[in-house]
Image: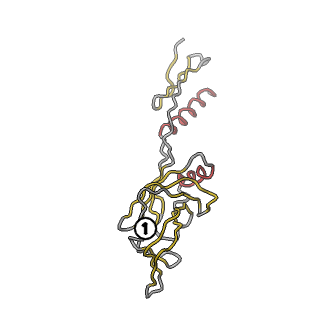
Amino acid sequence: MASKCLFNCNGLQVRAANNRDTLDCEVRFTAPTDTGEIEGVAVRFNTVDTYRTEFAPDAFRGLEGRTLPMLWAHDPANVIGSWSSFSVRSDGLTAKGKLNLAVAKAQEVRSLLQAGDIKGLSIGFRTVKDERRANGVRRIVEARLHEISIVAFPSVPGSGITSVRFDNPGLSAFIAAARAASKTLKG
């Protein structure tokens, strides 16, 4: 019985027999590429926030080798992952972390991030040393970082997620091929 190729997308071929009695379809699944990895600017230095506070570039010391909890909206009951890599740059503190995709709230947050619905970051810290400026702004000179939260509205302008790893091009191709095959079967 001869068959002809009706659809080919990234190695997925859908074949139908000339009499439409059979369908020969091969599907290959691979491990998902979505690891929950994210990164962003946790706080901008020398930037006045909504609380009339700013952070000095050397306010955060001793982050090397530390891991901090990733929270949803500063809620300790909503730990959604962890931050494990930090970099102090001239303009701000950057962090890299991973959502724990075994946690339902982390999956929700990932969906919001992927859709672009949220992208803010905010820090939970304890002030060790600060000073008041003549303009009334409080400058944090030294602080202990306790957590970094994903939030809808960051208090420090420019703080937020800069990268979300979620690309899985094979999934998009599979969905398109499955839809085409379904239409062929109904035809």
Q: What residue type is labelled 1?
A: Phe
The residue that appears at 52% across and 68% down in the rendered structure is: 125
Residue in front for this viewpoint, 117 or 158: 158
Residue at the extreme left:
90
The N terminus lies in quadrant: top right
The residue that appears at 59% across and 59% down in the rendered structure is: 72
Residue under label 1, please give it.
60
> Is 183 on the left or on the right of 41, as rendered?
right
In the displayed structure, 74 sits above or below 114; it is below
Please, what secondary structure does the residue beneath circle 1 have? loop
The residue that appears at 53% across and 54% down in the rendered structure is: 113
The residue that appears at 64% across and 28% down in the rendered structure is: 186
Are there few (<14), some (14-19), or many (20+) residues within 10 Å of tag 1?
Answer: some
Could you tell me residue 118's position as x and y percent?
Answer: 55, 59
Residue in front for this viewpoint, 99 or 184: 99
Residue at the extreme bottom:
134
Could you tell me residue 78's position as x and y percent?
Answer: 62, 57
The C terminus lies in quadrant: top right
Could you tell me residue 34's position as x and y percent?
Answer: 50, 44
Q: Based on the displayed image, in which of its 4 quarters is residue 55 positioned?
A: bottom left
Could you tell me residue 150's position as x and y percent?
Answer: 54, 60
In the displayed structure, 97 sits above or below 33; it is below
Number of numbered discs on residues: 1
Residue at the extreme top:
1
Residue in front for this viewpoint, 97 or 164: 97
